[in-house]
Image (cartoon, coloured by chain):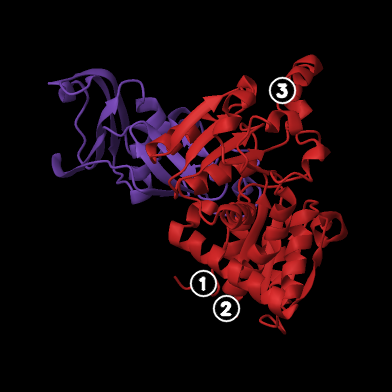
Chain colours: A purple, B red
């Protein structure tokens, strides 16, 4: 079993079914590289029945906020989040791209007012596959590549 | 739909019913204005026009519209004479101006500025152009002009000519036309074609779209020809520009191939897209289009102020 290649955690979060190659990005976006205390484990390029290859991120002693789960959804829409308590999966859910994205994404348009004035950037998801969002302010659309560089 | 206090920011926020209601209200006000010469719906109300970027037509027609409704106007026509130069944020400017006025009209070089202003202000905000994004009152007056000329919009064949790539007015107009049963002819040089995502959206929403670079080949089909300015700076070299420019000039010769009833529109200012000899022909309605700006903006001011 793939999971056993990496140490099990007692309490924390396991983000599974991340598309291969996106695991590091997940760690960076969630700022897990600045984690204090608990262990952080990345399994990259692991065999997966669903995806062929996948990445897994395990975070000890930390649970994710809704905002963080939304961020993961943008990078890795296929991911599942497992909440682990006492070595057991206490809760498991698939991430879901929300209809509206607020606060976590910057607009790629340099002339957008949200990049110049005090605002909370906000986007409407107009397509999930392929991922496409529209800025609430300047109305420009951004596609996956632009979204990832502006998270 | 309750119009009092509503903001007018993007044509995307308008349903067909909203558009029709504005056009109907504008028609009514135009009629009343003709009968009475002066209206007093907005007596005691103050419009603030905040033009962070220069404009002739839009600012003057908003001011004219407010005066014709019996209201008064304050404002500025360039940011350099205001506290913005001292580094004041848009937020603070709006928060200040709303203490002095009942409705705000804003033109700003940043895209999304009008949306932000509307969020900050408690009074209604009308977008008079935010960077290259939206200019919804232009679109509404374009629709008003078409409707005044034909009595309808459904069933028309409409040609959009010139710079379809960067032209804000043609993007908004085509977006608004998706609410109607029209056929669109997109006529432009290869380099300035309508962006793919807009063409796709038009087709998805059931509009029949034809793309061509040949004006003379399609002019005979059209009921409306909406011309826009082709800007020199869009071309890599001047020769290329001159070649293209010449093939999109509307003159009496080209119009011989058109239907008797064809109407030619232009958001103005024009350079040489339409020869002045066309001005006196029955095809030209671009100055009528300028006039339409007043009743349409009267309607929007009156509706958002809640005084009609």
Q: Residue at x 75, y 77 (%)?
A: B37
Q: Position of residue B172 (x, y in %)?
A: 57, 45
Q: Residue at x 38, y 37 (%)?
A: B204
Q: Position of residue A11 (x, y in %)?
A: 22, 42
Q: Chain of mark 1?
A: B
- Give above or below for A43 relative to A61: above
Q: Earlier in the sequence, mark 1 or mark 3?
A: 1
Q: Are marks 1 and 2 on the same chain?
A: yes
Q: Position of residue A56 (x, y in %)?
A: 27, 27
Q: Secondary structure at mark 1?
A: loop
Q: Is residue B199 left or right of residue B250?
A: left
- Give above or below for B208 relative to B243: below
Tally of marks: 3
Q: Residue at x 60, y 67 (%)?
A: B26
Q: Are marks 1 and 2 in contact (CB under 8 Å)?
A: yes
Q: Nearer the viewer, residue B249 or B189?
A: B249
How far apart are the alpha carbons under marks 1 and 3? 44 Å
Q: Which residue does the numbered mark 3 point to in the structure image?
A: B247
Quarter of the rendering occupied by the C terminus of chain B: bottom right
Q: Which residue does the numbered mark 2 point to in the structure image?
A: B306
């Amino acid at each position: 079993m793939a999971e056993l290649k990496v140490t099990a955690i007692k309490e924390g979060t396991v983000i599974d079914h991340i598309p291969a190659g996106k695991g590091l990005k997940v760690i960076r976006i969630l700022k897990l590289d600045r984690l204090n205390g608990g262990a952080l484990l990345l399994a990259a390029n692991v065999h997966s029945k669903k995806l062929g290859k996948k990445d897994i991120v395990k975070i000890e002693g930390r649970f994710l906020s809704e905002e963080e789960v939304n961020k993961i959804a943008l990078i890795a829409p296929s991911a599942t989040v497992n909440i682990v308590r006492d070595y057991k999966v206490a809760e498991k859910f698939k991430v879901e791209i929300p209809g509206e994205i607020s606060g976590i994404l910057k607009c790629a348009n340099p002339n957008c007012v949200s990049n110049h004035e005090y605002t909370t950037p906000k986007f409407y998801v107009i397509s999930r596959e392929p991922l496409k969002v529209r800025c609430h302010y300047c109305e420009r659309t951004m596609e996956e590549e632009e979204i990832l560089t502006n998270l | 739909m309750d119009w009092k206090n509503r903001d007018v920011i993007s044509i995307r926020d308008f349903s067909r019913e909203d558009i029709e209601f504005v056009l109907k209200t504008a028609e009514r006000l135009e009629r009343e204005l003709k009968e009475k010469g002066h209206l007093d719906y907005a007596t005691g109300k103050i419009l603030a026009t905040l033009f962070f970027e220069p404009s002739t037509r839009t600012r003057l027609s908003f001011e004219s519209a407010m005066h014709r409704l019996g209201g008064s106007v304050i404002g500025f026509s360039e940011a350099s004479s205001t506290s913005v130069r001292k580094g004041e944020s848009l937020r603070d400017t709006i928060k200040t101006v709303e203490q002095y006025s009942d409705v705000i009209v804003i033109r700003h070089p940043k895209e999304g500025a009008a949306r932000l202003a509307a969020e900050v202000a408690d009074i209604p905000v009308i977008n008079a152009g935010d960077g290259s994004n939206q200019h919804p009152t232009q679109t509404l007056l374009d629709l008003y002009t078409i409707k005044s000329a034909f009595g309808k919009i459904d069933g028309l064949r409409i040609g959009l000519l010139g710079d379809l790539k960067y032209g804000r007015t043609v993007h908004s107009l085509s977006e608004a036309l998706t609410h109607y049963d029209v056929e669109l002819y997109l006529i432009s040089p290869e380099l300035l074609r309508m962006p793919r995502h807009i063409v796709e959206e038009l087709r998805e929403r059931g509009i029949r779209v034809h793309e061509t670079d040949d004006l003379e080949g399609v002019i005979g089909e059209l009921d409306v020809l909406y011309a826009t300015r082709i800007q020199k700076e869009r071309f890599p070299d001047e020769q290329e520009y001159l070649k293209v420019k010449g093939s999109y000039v509307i003159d009496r010769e080209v119009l011989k191939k058109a239907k008797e009833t064809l109407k030619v529109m232009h958001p103005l200012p024009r350079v040489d897209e339409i020869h002045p000899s066309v001005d006196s022909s029955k095809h030209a309605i671009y100055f009528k289009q300028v006039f339409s700006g007043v009743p349409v903006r009267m309607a929007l001011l009156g509706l958002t102020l809640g005084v009609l």
